[in-house]
Amino acid sequence: MTVSSKDLAQREKLTPAQVRKDLSFFGQFGTRGLGYPVVELRQQIAEILGINRKWNVALIGIGNVGSALVSFKEFIRQGFIIKLIFDNDQRKIGSFNKGIEVHDVTNLRQMLNKHNIELVIIAVPASVAQRIVDEVVDAGVKALLSFAPTNLRVPSNVTMRTVNMAIEMEHLSFHLTNENLYYTA
């Protein structure tokens, strides 16, 4: 029914004080000495993260990465519903991927507005990524997730997260190469 800051801290390898401080940033949670009511805490965290509602998402680029993302079931569980898919490959346009029609990228702006798209996933080659991002931003979308292997620019009122799998692999190789720095007897 309840969970303590100590229990939460142990799960996440934090201190109880850090858990309390982080939660207090968003408001009053829990009762001193009793902990946090689990159901209420989950609801409040979902509200803070914005995952207490459904989000309309578009995916641009239905190559290998894009196809994998459409199949990623966790998006739906978290409320991220891919409503539109775009590509420039005439062989893919008009086909369906996981029940979603692939549209021509030349219709991007109108379709994003028509379908009230709030988040866009970019999975296109580096050579066209900035042009696509500019069109998405011009359509009024304020949140983008980019898998394009390049640095992209957006205005300060737009949030963009970039997933660079090569950097993630470098992070892992660094830890394997230097594991004696972290795991001493």
Image: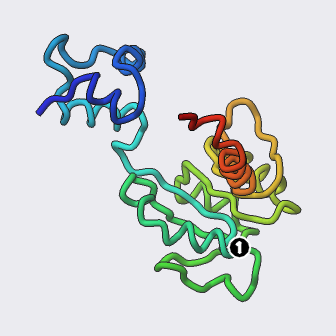
Q: How far from the left and from the top, in percent, is residue 76? A: 40, 60
Q: How far from the left and from the top, in percent, is residue 122? A: 68, 58
Task: Say how many tags the image has.
Answer: 1
- The residue that appears at 64% across and 40% down in the rendered structure is 180
Which quadrant: the N terminus? top left
Q: Residues within 10 Å of mark 1 (few under 14, many from 20)?
A: many
Q: Is residue 22 left or right of residue 147?
A: left
Give the camera-side residue of 87 and 73: 73
> Would residue 163 be seen by someone viewing this image from the given angle?
no
The correct choice, above or below, for 84 with respect to 18 in the image is below
> Would residue 171 be seen by someone viewing this image from the given angle?
yes
The correct choice, above or below, for 16 with respect to 131 in the image is above
Q: Is residue 33 left or right of residue 118?
A: left
Q: How far from the left and from the top, in percent, is residue 173? A: 71, 52
- The residue that appears at 55% across and 78% down in the rendered structure is 101
Colour logic: rainbow
The correct choice, above or below, for 145 with respect to 28 in the image is below
Name, please, the residue furthest toward the right. 127
**Disc 1 residue type (three-letter):** Asp
